[in-house]
Image (spheres, grey):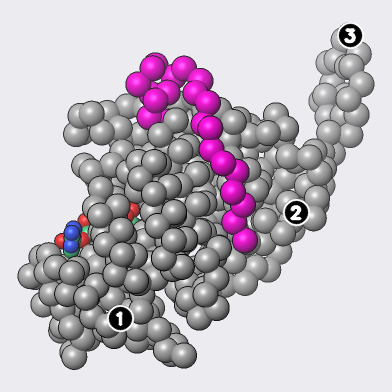
Amino acid sequence: MTTRVAIVGAGRWGPNLARNFHDLERSELRWVIDRDDARQALVRERYPGIQTGPSAEAAFEDPEVDAVVIATPTVTHYDLVAAALEAGKHVLVEKPITADSARGAELVALAKERGRVLMVGHVFLFNGAIRYVKRTLDAGELGRTFYIAMTRTNFGPIRMDVNASWDLATHDISITNYWLDAVPLTVSATGGSWINRPVQDAVFVTMRYPNDLLVQLHASWLHPRKARNIEIVGERRMLMFDDLNSAAPIRLCDNQVTSDTVSPAWVDTLDSFRASIHQGEVSTPEVSSGEPLKNECDAFLDAVEAGDLEPPSSGAFGVDVVRVLEAIDRSMAEGGAEQTVGAQNVGAK
Ligand SMILES: NC(=O)c1ccc[n+]([C@@H]2O[C@H](COP(=O)([O-])OP(=O)(O)OC[C@H]3O[C@@H](n4cnc5c(N)ncnc54)[C@H](O)[C@@H]3O)[C@@H](O)[C@H]2O)c1
């Protein structure tokens, strides 16, 4: 079976999707739509013979298109996804699914009603290292998870349509919801807007998941250092993930507190200070490499071929991520006050 694909949006990210759906043997790239003529010209140069145009309608009306991939700015997602589903197409939409969770839920209902696949491009769910960590957590190898610290910083690109939370923290929220098969109960957040008020350039978020599990997250596009780090502190072991270290993205540390007895009243030697912790071997497990976006495109094609209406990174999973983003915005608007998320806890495969 060959799935015939139209891509809407050929800005910064769309070309990566176009390359994958063009190169995969079981899909055929038929259309690339972008309202900007110059982007269309670049597409024709790269892929002679592929149809281009400024309006998504042409591709939605084409009976020879089975699936549509939306890679336009977030504020445009709702209208484009709804129109594609109404036209009977399967949809892969870039993250976040919509700028509003209620409208995201409408899209989930519409996809179900039409019997079409609706998947969201939470690409980290298809990252070999992130999947390895999921298996490690599910197997209980770290013991109880106490907390997770996440850093996603960069200098640029600076966005005006969404804040750093919607643009960057989306990834981290999708990762923790996926790892923990849960959504945060509450969030509190602060953020700063310096470049394009009122869009926050940096956010500092605390999320409380069930079982007293804390996640601390810093996301910023206004930062001198590019960092993509996650540390997981477990009762029996600790894990470090560095997405910029492609050779060895994961380090497992055999670290644990070996005694919780109260320290003696007077401790004045380094040895006694260290007595209650064990700092053991650090191992770097092999994880499957391969381009996460290719895995994501493959998973979408799997779902289309199988008619699987609950694919990994489903529309419902994407809506829960948006509910967290909305709670972060509410908290920032209220000076960091803790907010209930009220999400649905839909797991991702
Ligand atoms: N998964 C990831 O790692 C990742 C990375 C970057 C961007 N993204 C997501 O991809 C989406 C696009 O981001 P980007 O950085 O490519 O944005 P961009 O602004 O660089 O590109 C968007 C393109 O869409 C076109 N466009 C906008 N509205 C349109 C419409 N109604 N019809 C046709 N064309 C239209 C614009 O002309 C532009 O070329 C966003 O949802 C973003 O969050 C995901």
For disc 3, the marked residue is 265
| Residues packed near mark 1 inside 10 Å, few (<14), some (14 to 19) or many (20 plus) | many
Could you say where residue 29 lies in the image, as x and y percent from the top left?
31, 83
Tell whether label 2 touches label 3 (CB within 8 Å).
Answer: no
Residue position for label 2: 138
Q: Are marks 1 and 3 in contact (CB under 8 Å)?
A: no
Task: Give the magenta-colored segment's residue range.
Answer: 328-349
- Can see residue 269? yes
Three-letter amino acid code at disc 3? Answer: Ala
Q: Position of residue 10 (x, y in %)?
A: 22, 68
- Magenta stretch contains residue 160: no
Label 1 vs label 3, nearer the camera: 1
How far apart are labels 3 and 2 at the CA level? 39 Å
Query: In the visual, does 311 lie left or right of 95?
Result: right
* Secondary element type, mark 3: loop
Picture residue at 38% right of the left edge, 67% below the top: 91
Up-down relation of residue 337 to residue 21 (above or below): above
Q: Secondary structure at mark 2?
A: helix
Looking at the rendered structure, which numbered label has been put on residue 208?
none
Tell me which amino acid carries mark 2. Asp
In the picture of the structure, the residue carrying the numbered disc 1 is: 65
